[in-house]
Amino acid sequence: MDNIMASLLASMSPQMLVQIGVNFMIIFLVVPVHEYAHAWAAVKLGDDTPRYQGRLSLNPLRHIDPIGAVCLLFGGFGWGRPVQINPLNFRQYRKGSMLCAAAGPLSNLIMGTGGMIIYKFISAAYAVNESDALYWLAFILHYFVLVNLGLAVFNLIPIPPLDGSKIVAYFAGEKWNRFIYQYQQVISIAFLVLIVSRALDTPLGYLQYGAYFLIDKLTFFVDIIARAIF
């Protein structure tokens, strides 16, 4: 068994191994933080349902959906266990639902920004010392940033059950909300078809790299500090 595993690993390129490692990072870090952010926001806004269900935790096992994890690991697309909330416990029903939904994508933007800052320091160090360790660390961090920004962009799509639908519902009129509620099943099926057919890859890719460009420009000060250090 060990020989088979060793042969399998030897047959993989470094890029493939890093990709697998990144997928595990998404499953055990990025997705759990996203779901924890929903739980944390709900509790802070007055709903203790996530606390009672054990979701107010950074333990990945509390947030991993087995099927979603397998799909993510082997298919590149997956999901975590949705955090259940009771909006009736919020002091302001609609506003609380919106803020709770926004917490997930916001956590990805924060992680993406933090990853970008570290990535810039590592890249500056690599420019001075071109070691393999620094190269792969920069490669992983770059992917980490893209993944978080991609998840933020994806979850902000205003289609149920994604977070963006709850955010838009707060600002949109009742006519829009009734339309979404009436045709929610049809819209969700059509959206799933678009995902499986990868028809959304290009537009989402543009939005992802647009977010990357924006975060890169907002962290311009890191470039100055990194150049001064290295």
Image: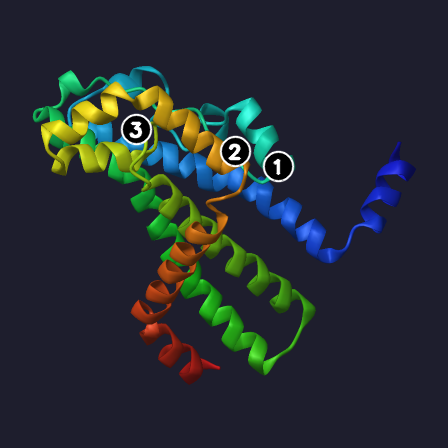
Q: Hey, which quadrant is residue 165 in on the image?
A: top left
Q: What is the crowding at mark 2: few (fewer than 14 residues within 10 Å), some, or many (at least 20)? A: some
> Residue at 81% across / 46% down in the picture?
9
Q: Nearer the viewer, residue 58 or 217?
A: 217
- The answer to whether residue 170 is visible is yes
Question: Pointer 1 and pointer 2: residues touching (CB < 8 Å)?
Answer: yes
The correct choice, above or below, for 50 with respect to 27 in the image is above
Residue corresponding to mark 2: 78
167 sits left or right of 14 in the view: left
Instruction: State the separation of the CA atoms marked 3 and 2.
Output: 19 Å
> Residue at 47% across / 37% down in the picture?
194
Q: What is the crowding at mark 1: few (fewer than 14 residues within 10 Å), some, or many (at least 20)? A: few
What secondary structure is found at the residue carrying circle 3? Answer: helix
Q: Nearer the viewer, residue 4 or 172?
A: 172
Give the percent coordinates (x, y) of residue 155.
Answer: 36, 39
**What number is the disc on residue 39?**
3
